[in-house]
Amino acid sequence: MDLREQLRAAKLKVTSGRLSVLRELGRAKGPMSHAEVAERLEGESLDKVTVWRILVALTEVGLVDRSNGGDGTWRFELRSGSLGHDPHPHFTCLVCKTVTCLPHDSVRIPPRIVRGVVDVQITGRCEKCG
Amino acid sequence: MDLREQLRAAKLKVTSGRLSVLRELGRAKGPMSHAEVAERLEGESLDKVTVWRILVALTEVGLVDRSNGGDGTWRFELRSGSLGHDPHPHFTCLVCKTVTCLPHDSVRIPPRIVRGVVDVQITGRCEKCG
DNA sequence: GGTGTGCATGCAATTGGATTGCGTTGTTTC
DNA sequence: GAAACAACGCAATCCAATTGCATGCACACC
């Protein structure tokens, strides 16, 4: 299912802006902040606010996951599907701000809690900055 | 060790503001946001900015832990010692915004990563809001 | 217990991410 | 193709976080 079909399946109109954002998220190796996405799309005459609204819209329909980095800004990444990955824990380094995706099974949470879990965010210092 | 001694041991001057903030954090059952702390201390003619600076100062000397709630605002709580508790994971409910402290061993993280970990934040829906 | 030094505080102002309002543009449907 | 309505651009707003600076207070030293 290509990008256009994903949008249509989510009942969102297919626009060049949304395709650009999805494409950019697809290139990323980890979650991107709104600022990062907007910066990479500067050449495409896309307003920052529009990028934000696109990210929110994509999150609401479930195409994108929104997580809260340790630095207080939202990060976005493609969700499961042919283009993305299933939800998984993230590790944010407080020093170099790098966000790393952790394997799905790297964190074990008791069953009673895990049912409602949407996001697992671990903050600390990566091996380089340790 | 009472509050005054804790401050002195941390080489911070003992002021009524700092004592108030520490006392308030001691009453809390979970991490509090800056806004919550400031609100509860309204009667004491303590400026919001001062409360913020106190929280930051206490965090820097290690008396207080600062964690990142799932909603993008910082939360503060007393750290280990006679008055507080050791670092532990937190669970934030996206719906009712409640923050729950989880037992220290409720999340298992592989040894390679755990060394640098400062904070573990889990977001989702609590049992009530499920 | 007075006094000087330097940190702590109050107040005003700024930053920056997030969010909204509204008029215009563009996509989809028929 | 034209109508209907969602998406967009731009300006403006909100609020947590942060800074600057002048004043006040805690503590050490006399």
Image (cartoon, coloured by chain):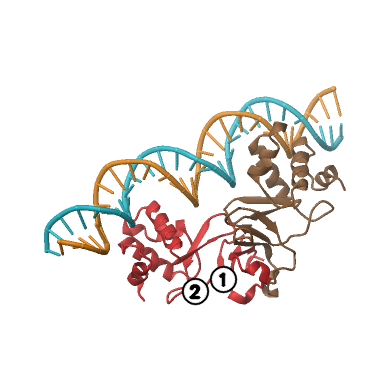
Chain colours: A brown, B red, C cyan, D orange
Quick one: SS at disc 1? loop
Q: Marks 1 and 2: same chain?
A: yes
Q: Is residue A23 visible?
A: yes
Q: Quadrant of residue A50?
A: top right
According to the picture, the residue beneath numbered tag 2 turns out to be B85
Q: Nearer the viewer, residue B64 or B12?
A: B12
Residue at (72%, 32%) from the top-left corner?
A44
Can you say whether A66 is above or below B124 in the image?
A: above
Q: Nearer the viewer, residue D25 or D10?
A: D25
According to the picture, the residue beneath numbered tag 1 turns out to be B88
**Quadrant position of the N terminus of chain B in the picture:** bottom left
Mark 1–mark 2 distance (CA, rounded to whole Å): 8 Å
Q: Quadrant of residue A40?
A: top right
- Tell me the crowding category of disc 2: few under 14, some 14 to 19, or many 20 or more residues within 10 angstroms, Cα based: few
Quick one: SS at disc 2? loop
Residue at (45%, 59%) from the top-left corner?
B36
- Image mark for residue B77: none
Residue at (33%, 60%) from the top-left corner?
B17
